[in-house]
Image (cartoon, helix red, strand yellow):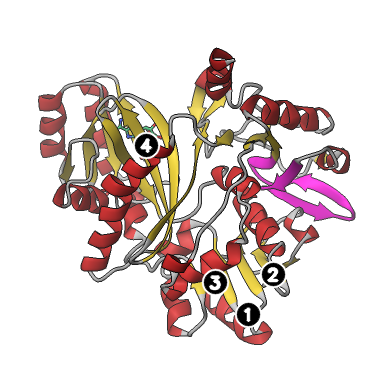
Amino acid sequence: MDVLVIGSGGREHALCWKIAQSPLAGRLYCAPGNAGIAQIADCVDLAPLDFDGIVRFCREKNIGFVVVGPEDPLVNGLADRLAREDIRHFGPSAAAARLEGSKGFTKDLCAEHNIPTAAYGRFSDAARAKAFAGAKGAPIVVKADGLAAGKGVIIAETVAQAHAAIDEIFGGRFGQAGAQVVVEEFMTGEEASFFAFTDGKTALALAAAQDHKRVFDNDQGPNTGGMGAYSPAPVMDEAMSARVMREIIEPTVSAMHERGMPFRGVLFAGLMITSEGPKLIEYNARFGDPETQVLMMRMESDILPALMACHDGTLDKITLTWKRDAALTVVMAANGYPGDYAKGSEIRGLDAAGALPQTQIFHAGTRADAGKVLANGGRVLNVTALGANVSEAQARAYAAIAKIDWPEGFCRRDIGFRAIARERETI
Ligand code: AMP
């Protein structure tokens, strides 16, 4: 069966890498892909929002299964369109993707079904939002309701900052995404990214991961799309995983089913593990980036049957096995990221780095040009390795980075530091 993956990031490279290993996969295509994906799949020059073009391509090539990576096409209805065209696919409908597309929708669903999350208010006017923030006191979190490319969350240290954030969002900084505002309690604890497949009825836990959002070492500097990740997450032991499934994931899956918008795909729960237990920070309706890179390294089972079961409603027949090894990925980004950065610099040494044992280099913003690999985005490479524990995986990833010759790029030098500190304590 021929497969089309939609997207062009490290997440999609990791998905293509894993799908390419499936005995069920025939030809593999990726739209639009990148220089790394081009080494294992045929890249097709189609934008993820070009639904007509995607459907036409699927017909032309007789594509048996489409895997949608990013949130934008999902929130805009690519899965609905593929369903109407009778093309099997992985990824939720636009209605179900509201779990990511509207924070207010998710908070209301949590409140209705007793799913643990931060106490909140949802507002469409500034005065009431400000009064709520004032009454709750700082620190407090102000969020634009809709998709804001990860920038719509403001942690306010003072009520004045919260008021300024509310004005900014209603002032149009995030366009339509800021038509409503959620103001919520500030939670403390350790964060983890938890993933579960669901076919609308059954949910199946994947592994958990932890990422590093800040751009500089020791979690300093502005937030990014993610500078590195590792799995497993020490805070998510088996008991905590079971609790998250019982208290958060399963009630969400049944609530969405009851509302007539079954969620079929991967639920990515951003969690805060607080002293009272796990609480939901937010849902994403697709795989995480860079978390997927480490999950794919650890997944032992064939991924394609599981992806198809999410579509077909047969997830209860699927089990997944995982390597006990830890995986860790370090993001290499263009100098200046997450601010302005230049494109087009050459990256050398990738073959030598990728040839090291237990190491994979997943490309994000790269493009091939006359046999060279050029930087073509902010986050550019994900240098990923397996090891007996996080320390070993980290050592391998940085050994690979040492072989990459790219003066125009940088990376954090401390990915995995929390897990490694725990490993040292237990030695
Ligand atoms: P989100 O885009 O909702 O995942 O938020 C981005 C980041 O803001 C999260 O990864 C958390 O670090 C932080 N955050 C969001 N909501 C809260 C909250 N209620 N309490 C504490 N931190 C939060």
Q: Tell me if residue 210 comes above or below residue 28 in the rendering.
A: above
Q: CA distance from mark 2 to mark 1?
A: 9 Å
The x and y percentages for residue 144 are 30, 43
Question: Does residue 347 show up?
Answer: yes
Estimate how packed mark 2 is, as few (under 14), some (14 to 19) or many (20 or more) residues with alpha carbons within 10 Å. many
Nearest to N terminus: mark 2 or mark 1:
2
Nearest to N terminus: mark 2 or mark 3:
2
Q: Residue 402 sits in which quadrant?
A: top right
Estimate how packed mark 1 is, as few (under 14), some (14 to 19) or many (20 or more) residues with alpha carbons within 10 Å. many
Ligand 1 within 8 Å of disc 2? The answer is: no
Nearest to N terminus: mark 1 or mark 4:
1
Residue at 24% x, 28% y: name it. 276
Nearest to N terminus: mark 2 or mark 4:
2
The x and y percentages for residue 65 are 58, 75
Q: Which secondary structure, mark 3?
A: loop
Circle 4 residue: 240
Which amino acid, mark 4? Met
Q: Are marks 2 and 1 in contact (CB under 8 Å)?
A: yes
Q: Which mark is residue 29?
A: 2
Nearest to N terminus: mark 4 or mark 3:
3
Q: Nearer the viewer, mark 2 or mark 3?
A: 2
**Residue 191 among those drawn in magenta:** no
Q: Which residues are magenta?
A: 359-382
Q: Which mark is residue 63?
A: 1
| Of the pair 244 and 210, the residue shown nearer to us | 244
Q: CA distance from mark 3 to mark 1?
A: 16 Å
| Of the pair 59 and 423, the residue shown nearer to us | 423
Q: Which secondary structure, mark 2?
A: strand
Q: Tell me if residue 400 comes above or below residue 241 in the rendering.
A: above
Q: Which mark is residue 50?
A: 3
Estimate how packed mark 4 is, as few (under 14), some (14 to 19) or many (20 or more) residues with alpha carbons within 10 Å. some
The reply, left or right, for residue 320 in relation to residue 141 is right
